[in-house]
Image (cartoon, grey):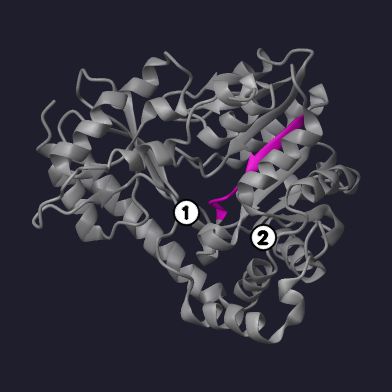
Amino acid sequence: MAWINPAIAATFAPPVMEARRWLEGVVFPPDRPLLNVSQAAPVDPPPEPLRAAIADAALNRPEAHLYGPVLGNPELRAAVAAEFGAGYRGRIASDQVAITQGCNQAFCAAVTTLAGAGDEVILPTPWYFNHKMWLDMAGIRAVPLPCGADMLPDPDRAAGLIGPTTRAIVLVTPNNPSGAEYPGDLVGAFFELAQRHGIALIIDETYRDFDSRSGPPHDLLARPGWDETLIQLYSFSKAYRLTGHRVGALTASVARMAQIEKFLDSVAISTSQLGQIGALWGMTHLRDWLAGERAEILARRAATEAALAGLPGWQLRSAGAYFAWVGHPFRLSSVELAPKMLREAGILALPGTMFTPAGDPSGARHLRLAFANVDRDGIAELARRLAGLRA
């Protein structure tokens, strides 16, 4: 075999794909079908009017099949700038927005402009595993910042981790995997910390459309010079069920956009035209539909909180957006418990060890349950199966 980059080899296998392999050879009886709470992506297609708009573009818009501008279509960039400016009561120009092949690519682009091999980036734990994987593969050290019992990171503790090679702090809110919604004052404190040290604050807001709060979740985009410190990430996949079309967004300074353009041009050249057309159509026509989706997700969150509250030994640490971070009552590590749950209870969930550094005891004690694709009857059934589990 030819040489393999040791940085690639050293990182872990994609967790969701690993969990799917547990399904091989497992048979689910008719009275106990699979309950899949492993993945945070919509399983339904976009609403029919959005699909019709994409189909119409495929048939009647020749430019939908060609390369587009590397930083994204001007109409979509302008729409993102307008919506985010209004939603956060700040000012964003369209040339401060890039459209990417999903939010993961937005993260990779941002980090690549900030850090290189040997540098450090601070990640609160439990972390989103793809963030850790990209840092590993780039030779960048992920510095863990353990969250407290409330599943919130502490900016004072983060300050003690900043060193001469620290290039950024990453926050995800609402959080994946914990679901925690970070208070605006906390986000502001991290911004001020990053600003004082001349490093970037990357905020992944993939799940912002399902935040339970009304009004802006933070005021960063209203602060003067926000783009000198903040890089904001977003995904259209969750809002409009466009996971297969891969459309994300990134907001940052115009100066950084010139560097991001280099990265994007070397990776995908331009984001899918049909995906961008669909995202813009959704932003323009589906506000009421999206409000209904948000209401349903919040109802499923409430059902999950109620269902898990009565389970002896189980501890719901936090819930929000698509996720619940749950402590289990067994001596087994979650990495052993998760496959056992699949075989014995028909539940596919991800162990906490997939979201924490090796050897971190909190990973062994927790599971991530992604409840967004399970209706309220399914959530009640999930609780019944967990209650009957013996380990």
Query: Where residue 287 appears, x then y in whole percent?
Result: 56, 73
Does 332 appear above or below 243? above
Residue placed most toward the observer, 96 or 263:
263
Name the residue type under label 1. Answer: Ser
Question: Which amino acid type is shown beneath numbered disc 2?
Answer: Gly
Q: Quadrant of the N terminus?
A: top right
* 214 vs 237, nearest the viewer: 237
Q: Pointer 2: what residue?
A: 87
- Give me the residue at 72% from left, 83% from top: 61
Q: How far is mark 1 from mark 2, CA to CA?
A: 14 Å
Residue 213 pos. (x, y %): 51, 53
Per the image, label 2 sits on a secondary structure element best described as: helix
Front position in the image: 70 or 205: 70
Question: What is the number of the mark on residue 212?
Answer: 1
Q: Is residue 277 magenta?
A: no
Please state if 175 lies on the left or on the right of 58 as rendered.
left
Quadrant of the frame with the C terminus = top left
Residue 53, by quadrant, is: bottom right
Q: Is residue 128 visible?
A: no
Q: Which residues are magenta?
A: 200-208
